[in-house]
Image: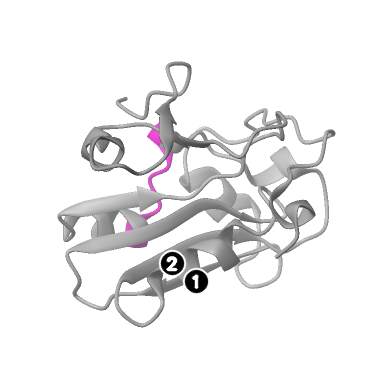
Amino acid sequence: MDDAFFQMPERCLMVDRYKSFNEPAANERLDIDYRIRALDRGSEAVILVPHGGWIEPKTSETAYAIARTDLSFYTFEAIRIGTHGDFHITSHRFDEPTAVGLVGRSWTAVSIHLRRNDGTDMVWLSGHATHLRDAGFEAELNERLSGLD
């Protein structure tokens, strides 16, 4: 894959339009404006994307490639073409029931996000998964987006 595959467009500023999943569920059309794809494989880990489709492009494809046929998978995707932030719900407030259920049944949840290109190949790591970095996975802790809320 070329580097452009993973680059977030410069115009992509994430300002929440919705505070919880109940709001887009009441105001938008499932499978027309947004879609939810989930595969519960009963695995100990789930790979999830709360900002797929037009919100953070290529994250769903990346997560699906990671999950392959082994891990549970979830993505919430904006499919109506529009401003990236139209369907953005900050991750710690993302409460779509299917995602919450998959995370609750899993020992580990890995959420895939796109980050603005800063000229490095560094992966950001947040939350409690510091053991990945300690095991040699090349990543730096993201202090600004801790993933602990």
Q: Compared with residue 80, is residue 121 higher up or lower down, i.e. above or below? A: above
Residue type indicated by callout 1: Ala
Give the magenta range.
92-98
- List x then y, in percent, for residue 7: 74, 45
Q: Marks 2 and 1: CB-CB under 8 Å?
A: yes
Q: Which residue is painted at 35% across and 51% down in the image?
A: 110
On the image, numbered disc 1 is attached to which residue? 65
Secondary element type, mark 1: helix
- Left or right: 68 with respect to 117? left
Check disc 1: other Cα within 10 Å, few if <14, some if 14-19, many if 20+.
few
Q: Amino acid at mark 2?
A: Ile
Q: Left or right of 44: which side holds 118?
A: right
As helix, strand or loop, the secondary structure at mark 2 comes to helix
* Residue 127 % position (x, y): 30, 32
Q: Residue at x 64, y 46 (%)?
A: 87
For image coordinates 41% across by 57% down, the residue present is 48
Which residue is denoted by mark 2 in the rendering? 66
Check residue 49 for magenta coloring: no
Residue 97 located within the stretch drawn in magenta: yes
